[in-house]
Amino acid sequence: MPKESIDLKAPLEKVLLVILDIREKQKQWDIKNVQKEMEELVIACAGVIVDSMVVKVSKPTASYLITESKVNEIVNLLTIKNVDTVIFSHDLKGSQQRNLEEKLHVKTIDRTQLILDIFVRHATTQEGKMQVELAQLQYLLPRLVGKGIELSQLGGGIGTLGPGETKLEVDRRRIDQRITRLTRNLDEVVSHRALTRKKRKEKGVPTVSLVGYTNAGKSTLLNILTDAGQKTKDGLFTTLDSLSRQMLLPNHQKVIISDTVGFMHDLPHHLIEAFRATLEEVKEADLLLHVLDVSDPNFRDLHEAVQTVLKELDSLDRPTITVLNKLDKLDKNTKWAEFENLFENSVCISAMNKVNIDKLLAKISEMVGGFFVEINADIPINRMDLVNLAHDEGQVYSVKYYNEKINIRASVPSHIAGKFQ
Ligand code: GDP
Ligand code: MG
């Protein structure tokens, strides 16, 4: 059990957001999106934003990232506002963070720490917790200066929830050892999963992975499709661990469908690394359902952000259905069908109101259709095992028993069809 438990009744932490508009970055993600995403991230870790400011950075400085005069502006703001934590929308070097804290006299954290904090709050399984701890230690390691650091200082509020099992005083070497151990354990998880996937593949059950920007409605859709009972919550990252369920398509074809961790804009590369066990599912999926909240005016950017992560995972070429969700939130006059023209293989749905789910299911059946073939075969009377196989692996339409033979009509995975000839 983690040492620190999260007190849900604790007063909300008062946050000042510093949104950095960094000119140098070639591909500019609209600064409004950055702001919105940061706000949602803060809310997801039980913070309340008392103020936010946008700071244009034309040339990042070594000492504070922003100019000293901007730092002084923040100092002035802090004297009038009651703020517990200052959060930067851009990653800070260890030295910049320390310099800022010295000037500001309040806890100062960056975007990665904020994301890690959310991960800590929401990791539930052993695997999820290991992934989070690993990511935290990897983040912490290059920031350790001098001989040692007292991790016991961790443990209060946003960005400082410590890795579960970390002892009070941990030096660099012990952190290294812990990282090695966690990496090894996670490798085992990965290979275990690879084995499970291989077994599934041998059984010919296609796998479907839900991907999409966080809060798009993936878990809601999974629930509807499988009654998985996965918790849905309006907030970022309420699901951290991958969850796989079996479901039956209307044509009775079996598929495995998995929910994945939320994707976000510019997910730091090392976080993708840390969550590779979960994301591995995506790489191997036969079909991706890219869930997109079309009621968000920035939906094109959200789509792009997810595509970027998929590219990072070498998964852009996977067969994909773009699921345009939250149809119910669109203005009545919106010609939503036109959205479907924007993306290849797309279906407009409302997961919440269960609108067009049948259409989506038909599309899924169509896209994974190649896996199954129809058979109408006469098999020896002593081959009940084949009848059982057809029941286990496919859909049986009819079984007729004669004196000498059994006639079976079914739809079965193509790789076992030969057994019935
Ligand atoms: P995830 O992060 O992609 O797994 O998103 P969730 O499934 O947790 O959904 C995030 C929020 O969006 C929840 O509050 C859902 O109730 C809501 N939501 C999901 N689908 C719909 C929909 O079709 N319409 C509306 N209005 N809200 C939805
Ligand atoms: Mg979810």
Image (cartoon, helix red, strand yellow):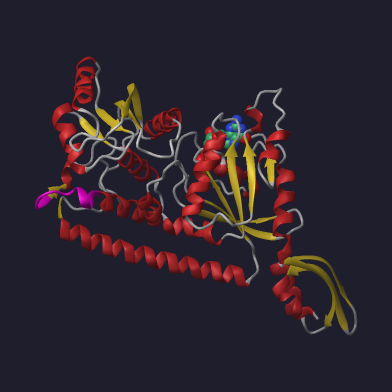
Q: Which residue corresponds to the image point at 16% horizontal and 45% vertical from the top-left?
A: 152
Q: How many marks?
A: 0
Q: Is residue 183 at all visible to an observer of this figure?
A: yes
Q: Position of residue 196 (x, y in %)?
A: 52, 68
Whether 401 is drawn above or below 37: the answer is below
> Magenta residues, as a range?
140-148
Task: Tell me the residue at 15%/28% (across/down).
Answer: 103
Residue 45: % across, % down = 36, 35
Residue 141 drawn in magenta: yes
Q: Is residue 81 left or right of residue 45?
A: left
Tell me: 1 left or right of 167.
Answer: right
Instruction: Decide if residue 164 is in sight here.
Output: no
The residue at the point 23 percent across, 49 percent down is 140
Residue at the outermost top position: 80
Relative to 373, residue 280 above or below: above
Is 154 left or right of 326, judged from the image as shown? left
Outermost residue, left direction? 147
Q: Is residue 304 magenta?
A: no
Q: Place residue 74 in its image quadrant.
A: top left
Is 211 on the left or on the right of 369, as rendered? left
Q: Nearer the viewer, residue 278 or 254?
A: 278
47 vs 165: above or below = above
> What is the x, y in percent for residue 80?
22, 14
Q: Quadrant of residue 200?
A: bottom right
The residue sitting at the right extreme is 403
Front residue of 350 and 87 = 87
Q: Quadrant holding ligand 1?
A: top right
> Residue 150: percent from the left, percent from the top?
14, 47
Q: Quadrant of the C terminus?
A: bottom right
Q: Quadrant of residue 206?
A: bottom right
